[in-house]
Image (cartoon, helix red, strand yellow):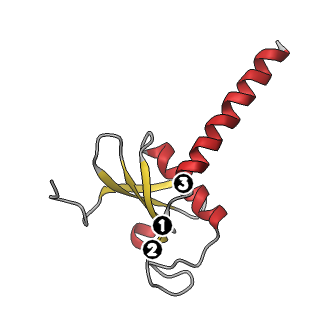
Amino acid sequence: MVMNKKAAFTAGAAGLGLAITAISGVAATGNGEDGEAGSTNFSESQAADASAAALAATDGGKVNSVERDSENGATWEVEVTQTDGNTVDVRLDEAYDVVVIEGDADTAGED
C-alpha cells in the first residue's frame, strides 16, 4: 500500500509541476494602483495561486493574464483561453474562490 501512496504523490507532484510551468508564462496586466482594479502589485506566488484556481474552475486551458480586479466583488481577474478556444474572465475572491466566470469582452466576436 505504501507504493501506491508514493506513486499517487509522485503523480500529483508531477501534475503540479506542469501546472506551474504552464502558469510561468502568464502576463500581469493592468495599470492601477495597489489594490485597485488592474493593479499588477502582487507576487508571483499570488499570480500562480489565482491561475491554478482559474484553471481548476475552467477544467484547464491557458492563462493569458492575471490582474487585481474589483468587478463583481472580486479580488482577482484571470483571463483563460479554454481548451475549446473560447476565452473567459474568471473572477476570484481573496481566497481564490470563483465569484463569476464571464465571456471575455475583449475577444468576443473574434474569429
For disc 2, the marked residue is: 29
Task: Count neighbours of disc 3 (C-alpha within 10 A) and say few if under 14, some if 14 to 19, many if 20 or more.
Answer: many
Q: Is residue 12 left or right of residue 108?
A: right
Q: Is residue 96 visible?
A: no
Tell me which residue sits at (79%, 23%) in the image. Answer: 6
* Residue type highlighted by circle 2: Thr
Q: Is residue 67 visible?
A: yes
Give me the C-alpha separation between circle 2 and circle 3.
14 Å
The N terminus sits in image quarter:
top right
Residue 5 spot, x, y in % from top left: 78, 21
Tag 1, which secondary structure? strand
Tell me which residue sits at (57%, 84%) in the image. Answer: 34
Residue 27: image tag: 1
Residue 11: image quadrant is: top right
* Residue type highlighted by circle 3: Ile
Residue 74 spot, x, y in % from top left: 47, 67
Q: Is residue 98 left or right of residue 41?
A: left
Task: Count neighbours of disc 2 (C-alpha within 10 A) and say few if under 14, some if 14 to 19, many if 20 or more.
Answer: some
Give me the C-alpha separation between circle 2 and circle 1.
6 Å
Residue 23: image tag: 3
Pointer 2 with pointer 1, Cβ within 8 A: yes
Residue 59 spot, x, y in % from top left: 44, 39
